[in-house]
């Protein structure tokens, strides 16, 4: 039996999970990355420096610019799912 192709949003979530794991060298399998768990202050232990590294990686890969003073950053970086949704809307590549 063949596996059904992933929906575009799900595929992007997996890409962003892989990007985060690689950029931060996390000891987590990207396939096991929690889509709805808090990115910061949760089990992953990410902090503000990690946000900067993730933002830089997103800019390089997708052309997405996330400004440090953006009031929406708390919502954008709330979960992997919200971050991937932002990338889907803002990507240039």
Image (cartoon, rainbow, N blue to C red):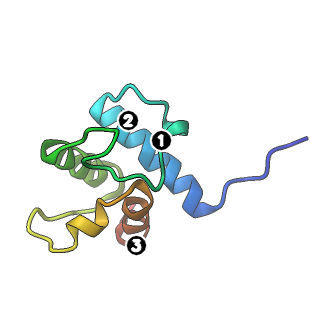
> Residue beneath label 2, please?
21
Q: Nearer the viewer, mark 3 or mark 1?
A: 1
Q: Quadrant of the N terminus?
A: top right
Q: Nearer the viewer, mark 1 or mark 2?
A: 1
Side of 82 where 14 appears, left or right: right
> Residue beneath label 3, please?
89
Q: Please tell me which residue is depicted at 53% across the width and 37% down the height of the picture.
A: 32
Q: Residue furthest front?
A: 42
Q: Please tell me which residue is depicted at 38% across the width and 57% down the height of the picture.
A: 79
Q: Please tell me which residue is depicted at 86% across the width and 43% down the height of the picture.
A: 2
Pick whichever of labels 3 and 1 is earlier in the sequence.
1
Question: Residue 47 placed where, x, y %?
Answer: 18, 44
Side of 15 where 78 appears, left or right: left
Give the Cα separation between the discs numbered 1 and 2: 9 Å
Tally the marks: 3
For residue 55, the mark is none
Element marked by disc 1 = loop
> Residue beneath label 1, please?
33
């Amino acid at each position: 039996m063949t596996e059904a192709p992933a929906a575009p949003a799900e595929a992007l979530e997996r890409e962003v999970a892989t990007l985060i794991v690689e950029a931060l060298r996390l000891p987590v399998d990207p396939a096991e990355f929690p889509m709805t768990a808090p990115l910061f202050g949760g089990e992953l232990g990410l902090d503000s420096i990690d946000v900067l590294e993730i933002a830089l990686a997103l800019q390089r890969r997708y052309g997405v610019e996330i400004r440090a003073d953006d009031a929406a950053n708390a919502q954008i970086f709330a979960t992997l799912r919200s971050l991937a949704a932002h990338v889907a809307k803002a990507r240039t590549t």
